[in-house]
Image: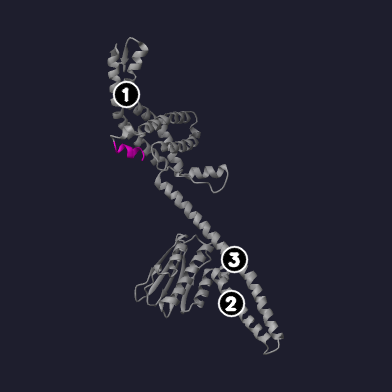
């Protein structure tokens, strides 16, 4: 429950802790407002820095009346140092929202808070204090500077009236506090800016993860190519030489021939594995050559129409494996006689488009375990899209679009 939920039950509201939380929220804002006003008058050039501190303090104060989280909308600089921090803060919308709030708080909000406290708490407190005032004087008391009394019964009656008036006035005070807190939340933790910042940070972190993943794939490919594969090649050659030295038609020759064949088979499988992890042609010659190689390896004849420059490595890798998965599905599931693979890069829009068309039976469903769902997730990391048109009876068209910056020369 928070202040707004408590106000929805007006009869029970005075018996909860929320009226006093509201009072504490308004009272604690007055010194902050006075400090902001003094800072504005005495150190206007540094007011923005004070506004940042005030924004942090106000988000912390919101917890008194609103239990919903009020996260810091500011981003963390990409590099250490004061200069990077200043550049980032100057570009952030949250900084100028906090500055606007600080100006509003220094000039308008804290006086309004004082007025609300005075109007809603002043009369009940004055009436409740009438017996104390009379006891201190001993002869008479002037209630609220208006009514002069010279005995205890009128002061006690005033105290009872104050006790009855207090819960009544706590309701409008709570309503004002809820509106005041809502204004602070709207300016200091705007949901749209917060979501944009966080989505932007998630997007950047996903891009970094993809780049790290591709670098790791290339490292594994190099280790297998330069390590295990070379040892298998040497082993195969050694077994071949040993077969030449073994007596023909002997049991040793048969065992060596079998071992030689097994080593050759393992070498072939390892080469296929290396090619599946990250083909060397993709790293050396780019996506155009890698797509041509994938089309040549396809079980179904593939006509290619590829005209591409060198693109960023994560984009080339995602597009290549999307094409390979699509070609594998064509060979396994479509029953097609031929396929066509088209790839273009639009330098104006900064977008790679890859189209795979086959004349098969259609009916491709990404949710049937064809591997296309995983590819869609992989492409989505790069803000790309994968769309499939595959009506029953065919044809099937797979379209991949990946935004990417202009390739360097």
Counting residues from the N terminus, which is met first, the one under dot 1 or under dot 2?
Answer: 1
Give the alpha-carbon distance from disc 3 to disc 1, as whole Å: 77 Å
What is the quadrant of the N terminus in the image?
A: top left
**From the viewer's perspective, is 154 left or right of 349?**
left
375 up-or-down from 26: above or below: below
- Check residue 22 in the rendering and tell me which mark sits there, or answer none: none
Location of residue 156 (image quadrant) = top left
Q: Please give the name of the residue rendered at 33% of the width and 32% of the height, measured from the top-left corner.
A: 15
Location of residue 237 (image quadrant) = bottom right
Q: Please give the name of the residue rendered at 40% of the width and 46% of the height, measured from the top-left corner.
A: 191
| Span highlighted in magenta in the image | 1-9
Indicate which label's residue lies in the foreground, 3 or 1. Answer: 1
- Check residue 268 in the rendering and tell me which mark sits there, or answer none: 2
Q: Please give the name of the residue rendered at 31% of the width and 27% of the height, measured from the top-left corner.
A: 166
Give the alpha-carbon distance from disc 3 to disc 2, as whole Å: 17 Å
Residue reaching furthest bottom? Answer: 249
Q: Which residue is mark 3?
A: 220
Counting residues from the N terminus, which is met first, the one under dot 3 or under dot 1?
Answer: 1
329 up-or-down from 27: above or below: below
Q: Secondary structure at mark 1?
A: helix
Q: Which residue is mark 1?
A: 124
Answer whether residue 274 is magenta in the image: no
State the residue in front, 237 or 36: 237
Q: Secondary structure at mark 2?
A: helix
Q: Position of residue 125 (x, y in %)?
A: 34, 23
Q: Position of residue 370 (x, y in %)?
A: 43, 70
State the residue in front, 2 or 208: 2
């Amino acid at each position: 429950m928070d202040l707004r939920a408590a106000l929805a039950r007006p009869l029970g509201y005075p018996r909860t802790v929320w009226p006093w939380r509201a009072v504490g929220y308004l009272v604690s804002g007055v010194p902050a407002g006075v400090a902001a006003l003094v800072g504005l008058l005495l150190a206007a050039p540094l007011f923005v820095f004070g506004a940042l501190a005030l924004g942090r303090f106000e988000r912390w104060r919101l917890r008194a009346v609103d239990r919903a989280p009020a996260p810091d909308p500011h981003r963390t600089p990409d590099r250490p140092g004061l200069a990077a921090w200043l550049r980032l803060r100057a570009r952030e919308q949250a900084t100028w929202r906090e500055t606007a709030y600080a100006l509003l708080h220094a000039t308008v909000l804290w006086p309004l808070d004082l007025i609300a406290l005075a109007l809603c708490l002043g009369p009940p407190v004055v009436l409740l204090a009438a017996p104390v005032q009379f006891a201190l004087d001993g002869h008479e008391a002037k209630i609220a500077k208006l009514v002069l009394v010279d005995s205890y019964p009128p002061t006690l009656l005033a105290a009872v009236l104050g006790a009855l008036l207090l819960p009544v006035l706590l309701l409008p005070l709570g309503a004002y506090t809820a509106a005041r807190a809502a204004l602070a939340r709207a300016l200091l933790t705007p949901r749209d800016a917060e979501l944009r910042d966080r989505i932007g940070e998630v997007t950047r972190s996903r891009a970094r993860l993809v780049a790290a993943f591709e670098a790791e794939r290339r490292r594994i490919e190099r280790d297998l190519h330069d390590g295990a594969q070379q040892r298998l090649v040497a082993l195969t050659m050694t077994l071949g030489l040993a077969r030449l030295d073994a007596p023909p038609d002997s049991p040793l020759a048969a065992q060596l021939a079998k071992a030689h064949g097994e080593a050759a088979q393992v070498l072939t499988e390892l080469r296929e594995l290396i090619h599946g992890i990250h083909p060397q042609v993709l790293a050396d010659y780019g996506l155009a050559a890698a797509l041509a190689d994938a089309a040549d390896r396809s079980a179904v004849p593939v006509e290619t129409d590829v005209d591409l420059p060198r693109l960023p490595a994560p984009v080339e890798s995602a597009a290549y494996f999307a094409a390979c998965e699509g070609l594998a599905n064509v060979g396994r599931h479509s029953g097609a006689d031929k396929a066509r693979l088209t790839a273009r890069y639009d330098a104006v829009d900064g977008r790679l488009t890859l189209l795979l068309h086959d004349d098969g039976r259609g009916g491709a469903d990404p949710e049937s375990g064809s591997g296309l769902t995983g590819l869609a997730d992989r492409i989505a990391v790069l803000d790309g899209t994968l769309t499939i048109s595959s009506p029953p009876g065919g044809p099937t068209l797979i379209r991949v679009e990946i935004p990417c910056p202009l390739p360097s020369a």
